[in-house]
């Protein structure tokens, strides 16, 4: 299945306020029930174990309202892992008034070197071209002390079939456009490994998670 770059409506808020709100609710549902939160929780927990740290400063890039990192923060608290989460997004409206939030460019993060333990992203990397993926991960490596955590989709024909099967669950026409578009422009695991081999990461781990989710750890040291 060839990668096809396809515009996603939510990227440019192309819809009414009600449609955008409904699509954001769809994203929360997808992340809650279909592997989004679970993938990030597993990867952050692995990073915490690898770093021997029980408290981690985390920057979530392209965060939106921050649903996934906040839910992971709650879950890991029960495992005695504390996360101090900062959200970054390009649009103030996406951040929904969160206190620890910054407006900024994901490819030019407005932070000094090693400002956070982890830099994470959820369903963002598939929006980037191959060249941008390398640049993004290197920029995240500059800002982190431990690792970059990527939670994204795997491009696969069966995944596309599951997305279409889920249409009755989606509340917004934006989701009905964006969900298949996301799968079409997502990367496969071999593609992601090849791209990350071009970055400054000391070591890279890429794994398949529940329902065609991809979990990535790009270690700084």
Image (cartoon, grey):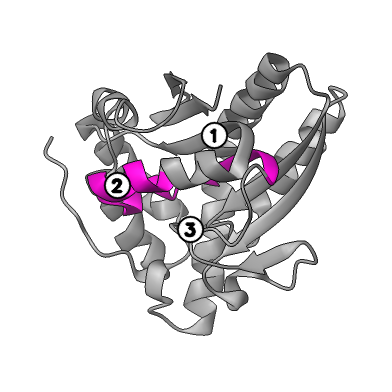
Residue denoted by label 2: 164
Q: Residue furthest front?
A: 113
- Distance from disc 1 to disc 3, alpha carbons, whole Å, reads 14 Å
* Residue under the image location 49 percent in, 65 percent down: 105
Q: Report the front residue among 133 and 178.
A: 133
Secondary structure at numbered mark 1: strand
Give the CA distance from mark 3 to mark 2: 30 Å
- Name the side, left or right, on which 95 lies relative to 164: right
> Contact (CB < 8 A) between labels 2 and 1?
no
Q: Is residue 40 magenta?
A: no
Evaluate whether residue 32 shows in this view.
no
Q: Nearer the viewer, mark 1 or mark 3?
A: 3
Q: Earlier in the sequence, mark 3 or mark 2?
A: 3
In this rendering, would 221 be left or right of 205? right
Residue 4 shown left or right of residue 10 in the figure: left
Q: Is residue 132 magenta?
A: yes
Marks 2 and 1, how far apart at CA: 28 Å
Mark 2 or mark 1: whose residue is earlier in sequence: 1
- Residue located beneath label 3 in the image: 106
Residue corresponding to mark 1: 149
Highlighted magenta segment, given as a residue range: 115-136
Please identify the residue farthest to the bottom as the structure is shown.
16
Position in image of residue 197 (x %, y %): 31, 25
Residue 179, can we see it?
yes
- In this rendering, which labeled residue sits more in front, label 3 or label 2? 3
């Amino acid at each position: 299945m060839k990668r096809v770059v396809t515009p996603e409506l939510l990227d440019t808020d192309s819809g009414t306020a009600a449609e955008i709100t409904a699509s954001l609710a769809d994203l929360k549902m997808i992340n809650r029930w279909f592997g989004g939160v679970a993938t990030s929780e597993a990867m952050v927990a692995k990073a915490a174990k690898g770093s021997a740290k029980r408290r981690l400063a985390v920057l979530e890039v392209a965060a939106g309202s921050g649903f996934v990192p906040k839910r992971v923060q709650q879950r890991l608290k029960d495992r005695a892992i504390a996360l101090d989460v900062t959200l970054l997004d390009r649009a103030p409206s996406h951040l929904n008034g969160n206190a620890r939030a910054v407006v900024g460019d994901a490819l030019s993060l407005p932070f000094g070197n090693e400002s956070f333990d982890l830099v994470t992203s959820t369903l963002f990397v598939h929006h980037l071209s191959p060249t941008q993926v390398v640049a993004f991960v290197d920029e995240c490596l500059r800002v982190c002390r431990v690792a970059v955590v990527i939670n994204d989709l795997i491009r696969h024909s069966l995944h596309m079939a599951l997305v279409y099967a889920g249409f009755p669950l989606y509340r917004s026409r934006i989701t009905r456009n964006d969900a298949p578009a996301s799968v079409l422009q997502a990367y496969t695991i071999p593609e992601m490994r090849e791209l990350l081999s071009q970055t400054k990461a000391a070591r890279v781990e890429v794994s398949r998670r529940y329902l065609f989710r991809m979990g990535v750890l790009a270690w700084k040291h």
